[in-house]
Image: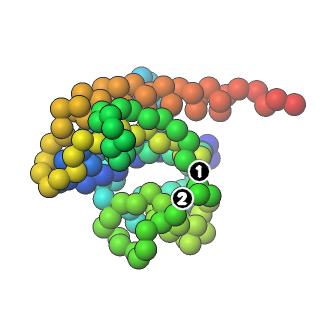
Amino acid sequence: MTARILVAGIGNIFLGDDGFGPEVIRHVGQGLDGLKDGVPPVDYGIRGMHLAYDLLEDWRALVLVDALPDRGAPGTIHVFEADHETLSPTAGLEAHSMDPAAVFATLRALGGPPPQTIVIGCEVDTVDEGMGLSAPVSAAVPRAVVAVNEVLADLATRATAPAEG
């Protein structure tokens, strides 16, 4: 079986901009530039345990779409590779919350290695109770969809590139 890529949107749609990941997945599902085979976009919302169990399957890579803390520029998109060694989960186990570090800790406890993980994140404006994204975060959704497609294309290129030797 060929290892696949999972595109996972995470976040709580009832906490304003924290719903960024699910909103991006809604748009990604409408146009993955022909990369749909083996690349399912999934809205995990706050189902961290579900994501940990799904990661036990044979995934070559995980593209994680999430809201990021505001560092002074709401709506700014960041793309980076997660360092599984330095992530530290929050205390306690909660099956209906989403902390990526806790997801990877649960995955390891279940005996699975974390796949290469690329994060596409957006700095939030507000995570107050309420549905709907703020204007700057909403405006970032199309840029995030482009970033997902670029990351997927890059991962596909690396998978088909001949090994250096």
From what the image shows, is residue 27 above or below residue 55? above
Kind of residue at disc 1: Asp
- Quick check: 44 left or right of 78? left
Question: Circle 1 sits in a helix, a strand or a loop, which is it?
Answer: loop
Question: Circle 2 sits in a helix, a strand or a loop, which is it?
Answer: loop
Other residues around mark 1 within 10 Å, as few (<14) / some (14–19) / many (≥20): few
Furthest residue in direction right, as rendered: 165
- Marks 2/1 in contact by CB < 8 Å: the verdict is yes
Dividing the picture into quarters, in which one does residue 92 lie?
bottom left
Q: Which colour scheme is used?
A: rainbow
Residue to which mark 1 is pinned: 83
Q: Nearer the viewer, residue 18 or 54?
A: 18
Q: Nearer the viewer, residue 44 or 70?
A: 70
From what the image shows, is residue 121 above or below residue 86? above
Dividing the picture into quarters, in which one does residue 21 lie?
top left
Using the numbered discs, state the Cα–Cα distance from disc 2 to disc 1 in whole angstroms.
Answer: 7 Å
> Residue 11 location, x and y as percent?
30, 52
- Quick check: 13 left or right of 159? left
Kind of residue at disc 2: Leu
Q: Residue at x 82, y 29 (%)?
A: 164
The tag on residue 87 is: 2
